[in-house]
Amino acid sequence: MIPRILPSIAWAAAGLAAIAGLTPRPATAARPNIVIVMPDDVGYGDFSFHGSPIVRTPNIDAFARESLRFTGFHVSPTCAPTRAALLTGRHEFKSGVTHTIDERERLSLKATTFAQVLKANGYATGIFGKWHLGDQAAYQPERRGFDETFVHGAGGIGQTFPGSCGDVPGNMYLDPTIRHNGVFEKTRGFCTDVFFNQALGWIDAKRKADAPFFALITPNAAHTPLQCPEDYAKRHAGQVSEDAAKFYGMIENIDDDFGRVTAALKSWGIENDTLVVFLTDNGGTIGVPIFNAGMRGQKVGPYEGGTRVPSFWRWPAAIQGGRDVPALTAHVDVFPTLVEILGVATSDEVRRQVEGRSLAPFFRDQPVAWPRRTLVTHVGRWPRGQVEAYKFKGVSIRDDRYSLVENAELFDLQADPGQKTNVNAAHPDVAARLRGEYEAWWTSILPCLENEDAVGPKINPYKEWYWKQFGGGPS
């Protein structure tokens, strides 16, 4: 269900002007710039703000203290699915994304992204870092609403899988080769710094041109392989394992780069009129055994630790920050929130696509009616041809109080946030209700699984393009 558009004459006028093809205007309180930062494989417990005893993230902590914090915010249990749901406002399976490889990471060409909506309404749009929604030409971000693209291939720098999902040959986190608007560039420096540098340069150019902008900054860190600048890796050497030290080093590097973004927005005088959102793309990974904020589970799992992530929103001109909102919220809510705050027009098809709710009512410190809702988490990743066999594997359906995991365990999240006690026998009516809602959901997604039998190319597109530009290739 798409929420009603806020009755703001200024916001509606901005949308109509853009649709009419008028010259884009500078960002204002009614038409903000938008920056979304989403690191990879960093969990809720991997920030000092959330109580980590090891990692130190002072810039993100300071930002969080000033932000509206959605403390019950969920994403998908792995990376490509989260990206699909975030950009389309609906569960990833409804866009054909059921895995991170095997052509099943490809975002349906029938889906509309909110980058496309923003671009159609006068915004400059850019992505910097990880895309992971299809490496073939038709699926690349420049075809999905982004003017400026600065991305690597596959799910991580240097990764390669059979079919289309792959990065350029021999790519590394240090001095990576990046595809910039369709042309490969050999960069210098650590990948996270490279992505943030490029994003800041682009943002600077757009603000000088008085053009409203949307920047999606998606570093592949702290995803494996654990390649970390040596000075960061040394920070926690001896405190934790070598792998954990590198992992935390990558997170602290992200924190430093995020601090550069917030400082730049302030120095440029556009902080008040810029909505900045910080979240991560799935639950915890390497840091989970050290600190997981009391949650059970991690990435690639149906428990809270696999999907609950930080979600910090700051927009000084319009959001009353410094508050926690515990309501059940999710990545699918970002699309309708942007539609509402910008007052832009969308087609009937897009309104039918988006199933999230606008978070805009929470922007002011006032009571908000937030009806019961259910969210489905499904790990997917089943072997080819085994969809039905995985109907209840790696799945949970939850509402604002209960979570039913794999059709067997029921948890009362209010009384037992760590999901330690199965109360299925005590509440069979609750389990039956959630099971029924899940059955209806499962029936609805089966016609949408368009990538299940897809066959990829023999040569990864990124390698093919790389060899065409620089020479070489298989003999």
Image (tube, helix red, strand yellow):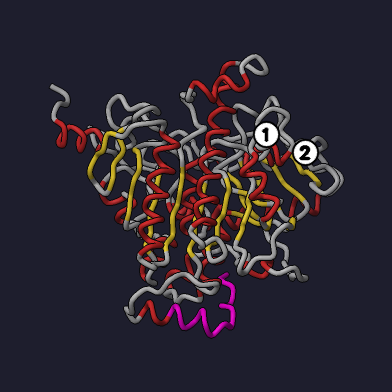
Q: Quadrant of residue 472?
A: top left
Where, quadrant-wise, is the C terminus in this rendering?
Answer: top left
Q: Which of marks 1 and 2 is nearer the N terminus?
A: 1
Which numbered tag is attached to residue 61?
none
Count of numbered circles on the image: 2
Crowd class of label 1 (few under 14; some 14 to 19; many from 20; radius 10 Å): many
Kindly identify which residue carries mark 1: 297
Q: Is residue 148 in view from this perspective?
A: yes
In the displayed structure image, the side of residue 205 where residue 258 appears, left or right: right
Q: Confirm or deny contact between disc 1 and disc 2 (CB under 8 A).
A: yes
The CA distance from mark 1 to mark 2 is 9 Å
Label 1 residue SS: loop
> Does 5 appear above or below 336?
below
Q: Which is more toward the observer, 274 or 390?
A: 274
Q: Give the range drawn in magenta.
A: 1-15
Q: Which residue is drawn at 60% across and 62% down?
A: 315
> Does 258 appear above or below 439?
above
Label 2 residue SS: loop
At which x and y percent is residue 88? Answer: 47, 58
At which x and y percent is residue 255? Answer: 57, 39
- Residue 60 is covered by the magenta coloring: no
Q: What residue type is labelled 1?
A: Gly
Kindly identify which residue carries mark 2: 419
Q: Which amino acid does label 2 sit on?
A: Gln
Q: Which residue is drawn at 58% across and 36% down?
A: 42
In the displayed structure image, the side of residue 173 where residue 54 appears, left or right: right
> Does 370 appear above or below 451?
below
Q: Which is more toward the observer, 122 or 380?
A: 122
Q: Is residue 384 in view from this perspective?
A: no
Q: Residue at x 58, y 60 (%)?
A: 333
Q: Residue at x 31, y 49 (%)?
A: 140
